[in-house]
Every structure is written in structure tokens, then in C-alpha cells.
Image (cartoon, grey):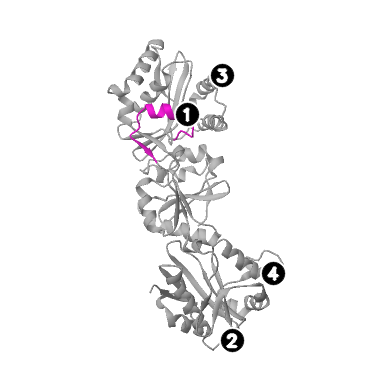
Amino acid sequence: MNFEPVTLQNAEKLRPYYINCDYRLCEYSVGVKLMWGSVLRPAFCEAAGCLIVRNEIDGRWQFDFPVAGPEGDVEAALTLIERYCTEQGVRPVISVVPEQEASRLFLRYPVVRLINERPWKDYIYRRKDLAEFAGRHYSGQRNHINKFRKLFPDAEYVTLSAADEPLLERFWQEYGTEFTKESAIAKNELRLAKEMLRHLSGDWFMAGGLLHEGRLVAISMGEKCGRTMQVHIEKALYSCPGAYPTMVQAFAQHCGEDVEYMNREDDARDKGLRTSKTQYLPVMLAGKPCFEVGSELDRLREIPALHTERLTLDALQEKDRAAYNALCLDEERNRLWGYDWRKDYDGRPVEEYFLAVAQEDFRLRRCVNFAVRLGEKCIGEAVLYNLDWRGGAELGCRIAPEYAGCGYGTEAFAAAADWALYGLGLARVVAKCFKENEASYKMLSFSMKRIGEDEQYFYFEKTI
């Protein structure tokens, strides 16, 4: 997958997905990607008929749940994300997951850490409730609106466009004189809101305001995504009592009958916002579960020792450095292994490189490198790698040429495969070999089932 940073120039590519997206969460909108771009650092690609967004938060990649197009395959998109993460050497993190999709991920991932923090939950309201403020529960809002109407009888709702920049500039000047919040989050949100309202030339966003005697006293801006209006901006002059609920009601009335919900986004730990948004009686607080995907390797404290009739498989040690280097530098073995170590080589002394990489990979629980020992001699390695994050991994085994032809590879591979299934608890182990590699084909056939082939490889699997 090739990711492209989200910019104002290419954001139109996201709208065909978001315009019909019923996830309800504010992150599934162009507005949030643009407004909070400096925080989220979003990038996107289109694959498997889906929009896949990769955010970078505090130096860590987090993926939005895939948004399917007309013929999109969400399962295939998730698989692509998992493979991408494996290739990049990072763990998949699927964040801001719509609650209705959470069960899918719980069933998909055997090992996962869930985070669902209260401050980032979105406040979701029925549009009709905000448009009418009917019933005794909304008596407070109606009283504030009546007060506003008495003080500002000529105020009217107007649609805002790019041509209204002078009106908006004057509003921001007046709002700035009344703005008293000191938190960095609030100040940054105000700066971003000003920037967003400069992007009204297209048809992505809906914006409106309350105009009184030629000046705006309140503004709102939103984006329709599915049946939900994502309300990105709500501002009103504090010196105009009742302007906020009046603006909320007017904006809801002008959204259109096809809008069922209004998302007024999260409260970002602001006490005033939480109090206010709660008083408007949301029908739900929409959670944003974050799934930090792990693997069965996370349970390992150390690489275990496995014993067969003739061999021992255990962790690579300093005493194995020379033999391991010779194995890793064997060009013919590397060709049949299907890996060129030079593409990842980081420039450190070659004699230090291979053992250090194997140990680091286990420290990060990316893979398990077993030394295959005949007595005390390291004669090869078995590697469990390429985790698919769904209970599967790939297994490979190679034996030094001077020990080939004695069945050691078959013996070591079978022991590692059994341990992966019954010791580690994987659901499946897969492997492949070049079609020309007869020795590897025999080794894999001994303990696995052949499941397919292509022009280059035979593919094998073991589940029991």
C-alpha cells in the first residue's frame, strides 16, 4: 500500500467514502482530517474497494477502521493493514473503531489490548431533538433562546460561504476579545477553527451563522457523513446571552430532513464543554475503541528449548556467532531462503549484524529464531516469523551445507511447527518453498499439508 498525505488539494478523494459513511464518529470526515492534520498527520490509500487512513500520533501509526466503497471488502482491507504492519516491523493499531464494528475485531484478533477513554467519546444527538427542543427536559434551552430573541429580535440565520470572509473576520476579532480559556488545547482548537472556515468554496461543508445588524454573533460549520451531520465548529459571542442554543437549534433546522443525527464531537476533558454538551441530552456517547493488536509471542518470557531424537532447538547465543554468520552469508542458502540480507543491512560490522538482529527481533516479539544444535554445535536455524496477527505465522528452516542430507532440517522443522501450535498456541503455521528446491519440498511435506502453488512457490499449512 502506498499512502498519500491528506491535503486540501487531495481531500476530495476521501469524500466519496465519507459522504455515505454511517460510523457517526467525527474522525470519519474530511473536516477532522484537515482541521486536526497537524495532530493526526493523516495519510490515505484506496485498496480492496476501501478507504484506508493511517494516522501518526506521538510517533506511532494508528489506522482508522476501513471505510468501504460500493464494492468494498473490509475484511480484505484489514488483512492489507496487517500485512503492511508486518512488513514495516510494527504492530497493527486500529483506532477510533465504531462500536458496531468492535465485535468483529474481538473475534479477529486472539491477542489484543483495548483502550476506550471517556474524554474522547463523541456526543451524538437526534437532529430533531435539537431542532425542536421539545419537552420539559429542554426548558432551559428554550428559556435561553427566548431571552436571545428578546435581546436580538432582528437576528436571523444565514448560510455562509467563501464570499462572507469579511463577516467571519469581524466575528473572530470580537470573539477573540471575549475568549478567556487558557488551555493549550482550547487555544489550538480556536486557531484551527479559524483556518477551517477559510475553506467554504466547495460543497463539502455546510456553514451558517446568526446575523444581527450586519454582524455575526454565532457561527456553526458541519459536514454530512451518512445520516450524521459532523459539527466541526460551534462558536458564539459570550456577550450575546442565548446565542449558543439558538445557533444549535437553527443549524439543526437547516441541516435537512435526511440528517438523523448530529455529532457535536468530544469534550476534550474541558469541564465547561462536558457540562454543556450533557445538558443538550445526547442519545449516546459514541466510544472510540482503540485496538492495539498483539500476538502469541507476547506471552514468551524467553525462547524455550525444544528437544528431538538428535537435536536441540534453543536461543542463539554469543558462542554461535561464527556459525550463524556463515549460515547467514551463504549465498546459495540465502537464494533458496528467498531473502537478501543486504536490503535491511544497517551498516554495522557484518560480524556483529546477524546475531544482533535476531536478538532484537525477539526482544520486540517480531519473530523467534531457534538455533538448531547437534550436540553443542549450531548447524542451522528455524525461524517463526511473518505474524498475521490472527493466530498464524510463517516457519522457515535452513541447515548449513555440511550437515545437509541427513534429515536434520525435517526433524527441526517438525519440532518447531509442533511447538508453535501446541506450545505457543497458534491456530496455524504456514510455509513456502521455491519449486526448484526439492529438499525443502520434502522437508515441508513431511509435517505439513500442501495448500497451493503459484509460478514461484509451493505453499504449505499445518493446523493440527
Q: Which residues lie in the magenta part?
A: 266-286
Mark 4 or 3, closer to the camera: 4
**Quadrant placement of the C terminus:** bottom left
Whole-percent x and y of residue 141? 36, 21
Front one among 396 and 359: 359
Which residue matches tag 2? 403
Residue 449 against residue 252 in the figure, above or below: below
Expressed as whole percent of the image width and height from the top left, the position of residue 330 reads: 63, 79
| Disc 4 residue type (three-letter) | Glu
Residue identified by numbered label 3: 177
Q: Nearer the viewer, mark 3 or mark 1?
A: 1
Q: Of the residues under marks 2 and 3, which one precedes in the sequence?
A: 3
Of pointers 4 and 3, the one earlier in the residue sequence: 3
Q: Earlier in the sequence, mark 1 or mark 2?
A: 1
Residue at 58% across, 48% down: 59
Q: Quadrant of residue 392?
A: bottom left
Q: Which mark is residue 352?
A: 4
**Towards the viewer: 407 or 72:** 407
> What element does badge 1 sit on?
helix
- For the residues bearing labels 3 and 1, Cβ distance under 8 angstroms: no
Query: Disc 3 marks which amino acid?
Result: Thr
